[in-house]
Each structure stands twice: as C-alpha cells, then as structure tokens.
Image (cartoon, rainbow, N blue to C red):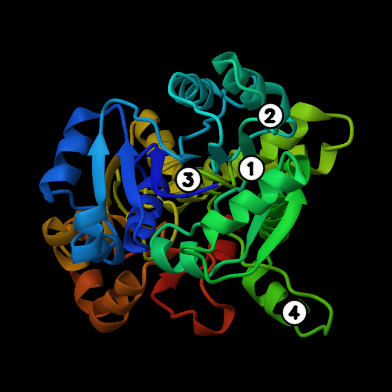
Amino acid sequence: MQFRKVVVVGAGYVGLPTAALLAKSGLETVAFDINKDHVDAINEGTLRVEEDSINALLTDKTVRQNLRAAIEIEPADVFFICVPTPIDPKRKIADLSHVVSACETIASVLQKGNLVIVESTIPVLCTRETVKPILERSGLKIDADVCLAHCPERVLPGNAIHEITNNSRVIGGISEKSSNAAVRIYRHFVNGELHIATDVEAEICKLSENAYRDVNIAFANELAALCEQINVDPMRVIEMANHHPRVNILNPGIGVGGHCIPVDPWFISEIDRENSTLIQCARRINDARPEKIAARIRQAVADIPNPKIVAVGTAFKTNCKDQRESPAMRVIELLTCDGYDVHPIDPEVQGDSYPGLEQAAQNADLIVVLVEHDSVIDELSEREERILDAMRNPRILRLYRPALTTSLSTIALASVAA
C-alpha cells in the first residue's frame, strides 16, 4: 500500500492542522470542506486562525507546495475523517450526520487499497455499525479491499500542532491489517507513541478520557457547592485536602466547556445507560454549574437597584479564544434573560477591541471574573485601586481564586453565599 495522496475531510479545528502536517511530511494533501470561502482562503494563503502555530505552518514553503483545499471530493490513497460530532441537546445522543455525510462522500470515490481513518469522536461500535456499512456501499469490502481504523484525535485547543505531533495515539484498526496501515501513515507526522487497539477499544478509550475528566471536575464542583452551603471556603478545603499523599482534588469552576468534555460522556451513556450512572450524574452536575454561579452573582448585587454587571471572560477556559460550549456565556445568558444589565468583555476573544478593566468598570456595580485569563489577573493586580475607583459600587467577585491570596477588596464566594 503506497501513500502518495491524502484527503482530509473537514478542514476545521482538527482537520486543518492535520492536513498541514501531512503536507509538511511531503505527502500530496487535499483539505476537503463544503465551505467555499474557507477553501478559497486556504488556497489563496489568506486564511488566519486563532493559533499562531497553525498560521505559521500554513505559510511554510513545503506545506504551500503540497497542500491545497477543495470543495469537491477527490480519489486518494488515504482519507481522514475530521468532522464534528455534536450532541442532540434533548435526547443526549450523538448527532452523526456529519460523519455519515463524510462516509457517503468518500464512498463515491473509494478505490481498492485505500485506507480510511476516522478521527472524529464517535460512540462505541460506530466504526463497525455505521462507518463500515456506508463505505461498503462502494462495492468494496472493508479489510478485504479497504482498510479502516478509528484513531481519535487528542488535541488541546490553543496548542494543536504540539498536541498532534507529540501526543501518543490509539490506533484502532478494524483488523490487524488496518491497524498496521494506519500506523504507517501516522508515522509521517506523529512523534508520540502509537498504541495498537481494536476499533471498539479506541472508541471507548477516547470517550473514557473525557468522561474521567468530567467526573473529577464534577466532584470538585459538587464539593464547592456543599462548602458554600455551610459558609466554608472551598478553595481552602481543597488545598488542605490535597496535602494528603493520595488526594488530588481539582479546582472547581463555573462549568465545563469546549467541544469534547461536555459532549463525549453522553456517547458512553448512549450505549449503556444502566452502567453509566456516575458519568451521567457528573454531566448533570457540571451542566448545572452556570445556574448556580448566576445565583451567586444575583446575591452579590441583591441590595443594588438595576445593577450594572461587568462579566469578564467569555471563552470556555483560561487563556484561549475558543467560546464553544462556554459556561461563561451561559451564565451571561441566564443573567441577561433575568433582566440584568450585563456587559461581557474578554481580552483573549476581543483582542485589540478589548476596552480594559478600568474603562469597562466605569459606573459598574459589580465586576465578576468568570474566566481567569492570566492577562485579566495581571490587570487586576496592577490596577485594582483604579478599577475600584471607577466603579459606582466597588465590588469585584472572583470565583474560586487560590485560598491564600484573597484581598480585602474582593468578595469571596463563600462570604457572598452567607
């Protein structure tokens, strides 16, 4: 099996950097996407994304020589499927429409000897029961004629190139033959370890990684809620508990965002709800966090008629621009729907248009820091007195800051709950 040409289906958060790295390795690479403007921008070299490392790679001479984008599918030796798999918000099951469409598109040009790799996060058994039958509509048989593997991506938004090249990967072939073929293509651009698995093992492995994180975050969030009910600082409790040699409680937060953790655990419960009760419970705890945080904010301004609230942070996590499934945005939405005058700002998302805390604080009654970007904390540290002077009511609410650094001018969440 010769690898000369690769088509990456989906030129988004994962697909585009993957395509660029394949091109950098010397392979003819086509980034297939249905968005014509996106395709044109890639081909014209005018596309700019949020990560500097990706932008730098896209301007690399070898990449420009080997990478092009297309709105029509083309035959190739290898196909990567890197399309989103959102969750149905009501039924809490995977929306596989993008994966199905990608498979149908590939099937139209599939040839004997091809390799198809699904990087999209998918429910257990999806490779065998959904992807395989669609590809076989081409008249070719999986394993006999075409290799198929599920190799789930492990990408941290904001650090995609490093993550793709250096993280270990799980190679879940539908057979040993398919696994070996997938290993060969990944060796073109992955320096991390490649772990051979079955397709089903790879599916559950990916889902379990994010469910594990979700459960641990949920424990921290539930502990924080309990501490606040009894007027105890949760950060101080967690700090003390973590001195135990076998305890490592995470920091609580306002919820869980991004495309993976709030979504992937539901893919497990979709297969077996009876044996995934903890996973489901964790999801519900974390999904409920924005409402609890909104309630704390209401309490912080309960004595002020028509308060002006400045909400700092709209990204889903610190030090990134990504707003997908952002719990901060949900908090802002809940307060706005209640009729509060909320002014969201975020230095990472807004860039040059970010007004600065001192200007945003003019005549404000409360500044609530929803996302603790480093730049925000530095700004607060350097200009706190001037920020407070600009406010109508000098109140700054930081949620779950380190226990030993609380300043007198900042409202601790535990005291707000009292």
- Asked if residue 328 can be seen in this view, the reply is yes
Between label 3 and label 1, give the one nearer the viewer: 1
Residue name at image x 31 percent, y 42 percent: 30
Number of the label disc, if any, that sits on residue 126? 2
Q: Which mark is residue 242?
A: 4
Does the CB distance between marks 1 and 2 fall below 8 Å? yes
Q: Nearer the viewer, mark 4 or mark 2?
A: 2
- SS at mark 3 in the image: helix
The residue sitting at 53% across, 32% down in the picture is: 85
Q: Can residue 233 be seen at all in this image of the molecule? A: no
Rate crowding at label 2 as few (under 14), some (14 to 19) or many (20 or more) other CA atoms within 10 Å: some
Name the residue beneath numbered marker 3. 327
Within 10 Å of the Cα at label 1, are there few (<14), some (14-19), or many (20+) other Cα atoms? many
The mark that comes first in sequence, 2 or 3, is: 2
Q: Are marks 3 and 4 in contact (CB under 8 Å)?
A: no
Label 1 vs 2, first from the N-terminus: 2
Q: Which residue is mark 1?
A: 150
Question: Marks 4/1: CA distance?
Answer: 37 Å
